[in-house]
Image (cartoon, helix red, strand yellow):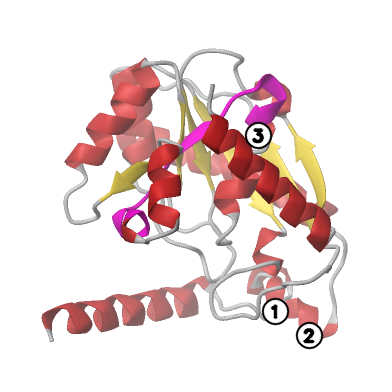
Amino acid sequence: MDPLYRTVVGAARTLFFVQGTRFTLEGRENVPRTGGAVMAINHTSYLDFMYGGLPPRKHGRYVRFMAKKSIFGHPVAGPLMRGMKHIPVDRASGGQAFREALTALRAGEIVGVFPEATMSRSFELKEFKPGAVKLAQAAGVPILPTTIWGGHRVWTKELPKQRGRANIPVLVAVGEPITVERREDVTAATARVRAAMQALLDRQQAAYPALSGEDLRWVPARLGGTAPTPEEAHERDAADMRRTRDEFTG
């Protein structure tokens, strides 16, 4: 039983109703009813934690997300994150987070991981970190490739968020579980997971209602939109890192 998590999910559903969010959930049958799994999710929105947790609810399951440690220090979000048994990640030293995630997986939990580590400003898949594959190998559990499309139109970096009833379609898809062999090359396995997620994302983007005018800012440049190119997004990410480092050392 997870009374706190259940309450938060209820509050999130109320928010979705108020905003008029129109969900299309695919592949819920690919979420195992029991046992551990690593849910690898693309990251374009601040609400991806909420969206990614929806498919497992069909089987009454909750996702324990790995999230940056600073969130756990927030006076409101921190107690909620700890109460829902999410896992803090210190990007300077991720060993403790890995061990906690491994313990959760071996206890039969679903652990949510964002392999890109940070939000994608280009709305394209960024380079993947190998942590999801390493966790799956160590725990002997499958990876659930999961993609979300449309959530970035609600709340993302640098663009205005939708507070009211915007009736935005959000597509969430879970692909077939991927098994990573114990001795499989981590780099190759990570590329395999990324390819599976790219295929899911391509299908979602093709099915999404066409956007035009100012709304092209939500569309990747590759698809004719005005979102930053991956190269431009990388430069902005690097600028963020430099600014954070300067603030920390200054």
First along the sequence among labels 3 and 1: 3
Q: Amino acid at mark 3?
A: Val
Counting from the top left corner in percent of width and height, residue 191 is at: 44, 41
Residue at 83% over, 68% down: 166
Q: Is residue 212 above or below residue 17?
A: below
- Distance of mark 3 from mark 1, alpha carbons? 26 Å
Type of residue at label 1? Arg
Mark 2 to mark 3: distance in Å?
Answer: 30 Å
Residue that numbered label 3 is attached to: 174
Figure check: 220 above or below 208: below
Q: Are marks 1 and 2 in contact (CB under 8 Å)?
A: yes
The N terminus sits in image quarter: top right
Q: Report if residue 211 is visible in the image.
A: yes
Does residue 86 appear anywhere in the picture?
Answer: no
Q: Which residue is mark 1?
A: 217
Percent of width and height locating residue 99: 23, 31
Query: Viewed as shown, does residue 244 lie left or right of 229?
Result: left
Q: Give the magenta part as a residue range.
A: 56-72
Q: Which residue is mark 2?
A: 214
